[in-house]
Amino acid sequence: MPEVPVILDEVFGHREFGLRPLVSNAHTARRTVLGAHVVEAPNPSRWVPPQWVVLTTGIRLLGDEAAQRGLIAELAESGAVALGFGVRIVFEDVPPALLDEARRRDFPVFEVPEETPFREIVRAVDEAVLSQDLRAFRRSAVITDTLVRALGEPEPETALVGGLARLLHCGSSLHHTDGTAVFSSTSTVEATRRWRRLARVELTGPPVEVVDEDGLFATAVTVDGEVLFWVLLEVSRGSLAVPLILRALIMVGKLLEGVARVRAGEVTARRMAGQELLARLLGPASEDEPRDRARTLGIDLDEPARVLALSCAEPADALVTARQLLTVRRVPHLLTCVDDRLMVWSPSADLAEQLREATGAEAVGVGRESTGPDGVRTSGADAVLALARARLLPGEPIARYDELGLLEWLVLDSGVDRVAARAADVLAPLNGQEFLIETLRHYLGTSLSVPATARALHVHENSVRHRLERIRTLLGRDLRAAPVLAEIYLSLLLTS
């Protein structure tokens, strides 16, 4: 059953006391009562906390209408629940000025007959509050036990938020920071409505936001200062003690924070394992069988896939961006950094353009489609060679191994390491003169077009012609001869 706090109407309900409400209505009668106290001294708010009933005979109010009105004003402003006035002791009846001020402020006043000792009213209120506290304590213990057990569920986040709704007989929902509902104990429509109510108010900070007077409560789930989720709880007004709601909601928030930290640790471990796995697959062949290890990461190495190589200014940053993109799109993947390159394994059809735009990569090389651990190694080597070609050709930032020409295939079959030394010798006369090498790249990449090369380099066409003449002189080769052009092209490809 829902916990109901002790309310003023219950105090009136003690017939043995003969209490008579003089100023009261349905709304004020449901005010929560936390205690009762007898005060005859001036400034009673100094001695009585909010949500308490004040009892008096009015001895200091005799013949002083201003003091009678002042007592009501002080109690109303301090948050007292009601005033119980003992009659036929000092006053025959409750003073009219006091009642007038109480009606004006909608502040409850009730008459206490001479034969009812104040101490009996105090005792009855204390017993009711203590009984309520005991029930709340027992309820809190049940809530704690249930929520802790929810941590063992396969989806602890939804188990916690759903369990809270069942325990408190209310509506609950879990939201991303953009308002998207992760879980709702009722419906998505209701979850959206709760979020809109939260969005309309100015947040005051943790641990709990009391959103409005209609029973909407919220708490943020944070990890290291970053808000990950919001938990919203919609409770029928007056059906539960507010302290119990707050305790339960704070507990769920803390448990969700713990779940988030555990999940973050698991995700980090999986990411590191994935990086290590791809690095090993791209490296020298070994006798280890990586398939089982890959399956623990949700990766099937026997699925047809490609390796992509991306040239990035900051490969580590590019890796984070690529991971976010592929995770959001639910694309299976492995990522790792090798030297100054970001390497990506994925069975997705074509990610080259998406990854280049997301990471800001200078160039992308795409390996051939392959299967198995050896296929990953082969496709990775393909991607590196295609990346070299993409770096060489201006205006073509993406190169695919499947589209490489015969000369590039020959270089791959011969082994890049064996040919690279010879390529360096071919271009050695141009060492230290990068502007000449850049001119060659654009010249070859624009199909030997002087005007196009000039536009790409932002120089005059005559400047390009002078540079080409200087290159011809330094290399001692005829730049119009097909074999020479092929040799220079491959040398640039291998040293880019």
Image: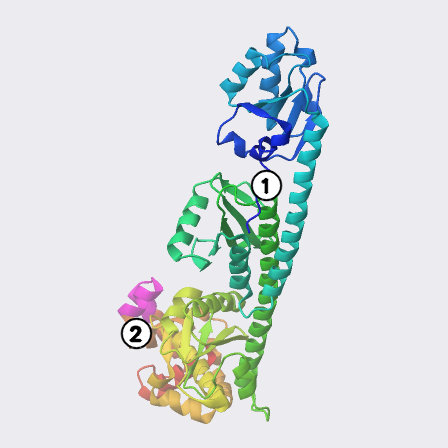
Of callouts 2 and 1, the N-terminal one: 1
For marks 2 and 1, give the CA distance. Answer: 83 Å
The residue positioned farthest toward the top in the image shown:
63
Which quadrant would residue 21 be assigned to in this image? top right
Q: Seen in the image, is 5 located left or right of residue 383? A: right
In front here: 37 or 491? 37
Residue 224, percent from left and from top: 61, 55
Residue 413, percent from left and from top: 43, 93
Per the image, the residue denoted by label 1 is 5
Per the image, the residue denoted by label 2 is 446
In the depicted structure, whether residue 165 falls above or below residue 279 = above
**Figure label count:** 2
Q: Seen in the image, is 149 located left or right of residue 100? A: right
Q: Which mark is residue 420?
A: none
456 part of magenta stretch: yes
- Three-letter amino acid code of the residue under disc 2: Thr
Tell me the element at label 1.
loop
Tell me the element at label 2.
loop
Tell me whether circle 2 and circle 1 mark residues in contact (CB < 8 Å).
Answer: no
243 part of magenta stretch: no
What residue appears at the point 50 percent right and 79 percent down from the top-left corner? 298
Residue range of the region highlighted in magenta in the rendering: 451-465
Mark 2: give few (<14), some (14-19) or many (20+) Cα within 10 Å.
some
- Three-letter amino acid code of the residue under disc 1: Pro
